[in-house]
Image (spheres, grey):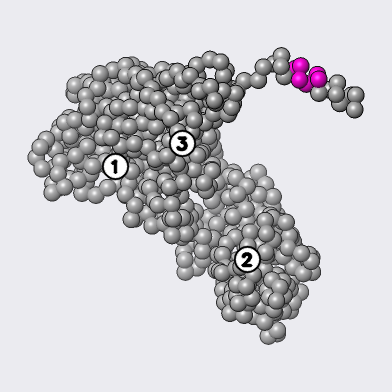
Amino acid sequence: MSWRAATRASALAAQTVSLATGRAAFTARCMPSLARMGRRSLPAAPFRYYSSKTSTAPPAAGAKFRYGPKQFAAVFVLGSAATGTYLYMDELNRGDGSQEPDKPSTQPQRSRSGAMPTPAHCATPASSNTGGAGGDVKVYTKAEVAKHATPETGIWVTYKGGVYDITEFVEQHPGGKKRIMLAAGASIAPFWAMYAQHQTEQVLAILSQYRIGSLAEYVEGASGDEVADPYAGEPERHRSLVVRTQKPFNAEAPIDIVADSFITPNALFYVRNHMPVPRIAGDEYQLVVEGEGVRRVSLTLQDLKTMFKKHKIVATIMCAGNRRGEFNAVREVKGNTWDISAVSNAEWGGVWLRDVLTFAGIEPGGGHETREGTVQHVQFEGLDKDVAGVAYGSSIPIGKAMGRYGDVLLAYEMNGEDIPPDHGYPVRVIVPGVVGARNVKWLGRVVTSRQESQSHWQQKDYKGFSPNTDWNNVDFSKGLAIQQLPVNSAICSPAPDSAYDPDEPLEIKGYAWSGGGAGIVRVDVSVDGGKTWANAEMHQAVDQTRDQVWAWTPWKIEVEVPSELRGQELEICAKAVDSCYNCQPDTVAPIWNLRGVLNNAWHRVTVVPEVDDDDDGGGGGGGGGGGGGG
């Protein structure tokens, strides 16, 4: 039995509008045949639809069809778009007299929750069908949509004139169920204006699968979907930054200048924002300290500057997703496609967090620094918020916060200046040796607690998992929130695929850093893919105590290219060893994870030999002459 015959038989035999029932019928009747053809299971998604009345072969990937008012059997993909192994879809007459085959359905149908897709659902996606209702499209009012805001009633949302039943998608939402439920029964446009990463063809295509109709009140340009841009008035940024996303703004420095300076200039410091940059006047700023074991206090910026001793530290901040782009060569991951520059180094000025907590009532050495103590975590909450008022939040263990050598700083200066808006003005927390996600910007609240922050970014993000964990089986509650980062290094120069002079020493430079205050004791560099190694010269511009090495280590080396490799493509590798003798793994695949964090594999750069222009020109001319003679 061919796949087409098998699926046709299943669809006609099932005689049902239930996707779940049709799937069960198909599995029972046809899986033995499909198993012989190499298929062992049915994937859950994505779904594709087509009809024998409009197409005699599986459609091309992404093809869409408008079916008019007729009902169709709901079917699902057997294989990838590349193989074309789509389930057959035929017109369906239920045969029970309850509905004429050419009469449109009067009830909304869900593509994944059990009902077959209506013509509106199978029509063009929201990205191109943004308003108006054709004769074959079910139309709903805002009041009707508002009645569908719970799992019991079904969860509907609207976007640019379309109405979508996302009931079964809610549990799969990468940002968590709580956040997407804020839009239940209403428009998702304000949230997508905040989280602009949704506005891609890929996300719009996913949304289009859930379309059940159109919004009656939608008028292009005059709908409630037209929301004010929350990113209007963002700070000016340096034009040389390599932008990963505009809204929210995320950018890194060009790789060839990252290690040029021990201290990163403010304008070139990498930017990691989760939401719009809040506008905060320094003279109106208030920091609230509260929680278990402390009295509630509120401190102004002036209070911080005058009531507590000022301290300075030089500390590197690295994003958990630094070097994420390399993971995509193994399997695609979600998140900003950072290169090697989501890391920067600065001198920070401010007051010790432990001094502020002591002022609020935490006693140094009073049992609060141990697991047996009442307070085990210090939570931070930023003043950057989404449209629902949810603030960015994170936390660190009390031992780091109160430790004499923890050096956690409430910073109001960056490289001798007021902290720029993109980096947390007027106050941010600097947690040296710890992942950037815990260095909360625009700090508004400090909370002492028995438990970690319950924010999305502590509980549902910035955690590492094994390579066999994917978005279908991940359980974030079982993952440990990232604190200290592993030892890492990167090659900043030469750039990937650049040319080298085979007759000259090859200059290589980069940076190395390890979390937890561990210093770098060695950087090894290879120009033959890791067969032989040489030690790089390391540079530290400031004195740092062992176990309090918060700043990165720039390094450089000049290597004579071995004679047997001159004129060949070279694979340069770098790996660092920290003071705990931790070292980097040699490849990316064993540390791949679905969020693309914690990439500390050997960094590899390929360079090619320079081509002599004169030789190239002469050779080209000779080739041309030969061709003419032929």
Residue 366 higher or lower than 415, as above or below: below
Residue 112 higher or lower than 306, as above or below: below
User: Disc 3 on helix, strand or loop?
Assistant: loop
Q: CA distance from mark 1 to mark 3?
A: 24 Å
The residue located at (38%, 47%) in the rendering is: 464
Q: CA distance from mark 1 to mark 2?
A: 44 Å
Instruction: Decide which of tag 1 and tag 3 comes sooner along the chain.
Output: 3
**Residue picked out by circle 3:** 323
Residue 618 placement (x, y as % from top left) = 76, 16
411 or 598, nearer to the observer? 598
* Disc assigned to residue 395: 1
Residue 597 placement (x, y as % from top left) = 42, 42
Q: Nearer the viewer, mark 1 or mark 3?
A: 3
Horizontally, residue 133 falls left or right of residue 438, namely right
Residue 425 placement (x, y as % from top left) = 37, 27
The residue located at (51%, 63%) in the rendering is: 168
The residue located at (60%, 77%) in the rendering is: 32
Residue 69 placement (x, y as % from top left) = 74, 68
**Residue picked out by circle 2:** 78
- Whether the residues at callouts 2 and 3 have beta carbons within 8 Å, the answer is no
Q: CA distance from mark 2 to mark 3?
A: 34 Å
Q: Residue 275 magenta-drawn?
A: no
Kind of residue at badge 2: Leu
258 or 124, nearer to the observer? 258
Q: Main secondary structure of the magenta part?
A: helix
Residue lying farthest right? 629
Kind of residue at badge 1: Ser
Horizontally, residue 413 falls left or right of residue 398, namely right
Q: Is residue 250 visible?
A: no
